[in-house]
Image: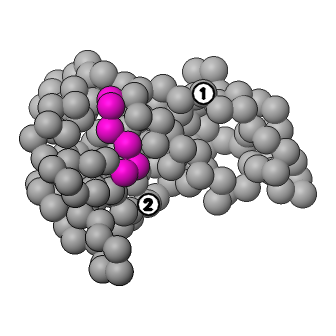
Amino acid sequence: GSGNSVHNRFTYRRRVEFRDTDMAGIVHFSVYFVYMEESEHEFLRSVGLGVFSQLDGETISWPRVAAACNYRSAIRFEEEVDIHVSLKRIGTTSLTYDHQILRQSDLIADGTVTAVCCRIQPGQPPEPLEIPQEFLERLTPYQIVSED
């Protein structure tokens, strides 16, 4: 088949704030990255994880290593958008999120963000970590599985 099989999807609803818009009254391109980050944080909370999680006395977080966005249509002040969040890929140490930004059923933009599971220790750079099994159990239901 050509498409993606059914999977769980997290939806975050957001109203466009005045500060999100440019002189023309449309959402500035950079703001889409803020929307993707907010929806990712809400998604993590919804599955019982967080931007920072504690596991076996260690602090684990998800620094981003890549982000991309494709723009299809403009959105304006006070419009509502839904951001659908799925996981495009679950790697050994990283997650690649798939974000679909919609106004009603119109696709406004879509983007991806790749975040790496890291051990966070004060005064040291983040250290990549294999994604813990108990995290995988919460994340895997949101992975997009191709039918091909």
- Residue marked by disc 1: 13
Q: Is residue 56 above or below residue 39?
A: below
- The dot on residue 60 is none
- Residue marked by disc 2: 67
Locate residue 4: give its quadrant.
top left
- Image quadrant holding the N terminus, namely top left
Q: Position of residue 117 (x, y in %)?
A: 24, 57
Q: Position of residue 115 (x, y in %)?
A: 33, 57
Tell me if residue 127 can be seen. yes
Magenta region: 47-52
Q: Out of 139 and 28, give the one closest to the viewer.
A: 139
- Image quadrant holding the C terminus, namely top left
Q: Is residue 6 above or below residue 31?
A: above
* Residue at x 50% of width, y 49% of height: 37
* Residue at x 41% of width, y 34% of height: 45
Amino acid type for the residue under numbered disc 2: Ala
* Residue 51 magenta: yes
* Residue 83 magenta: no
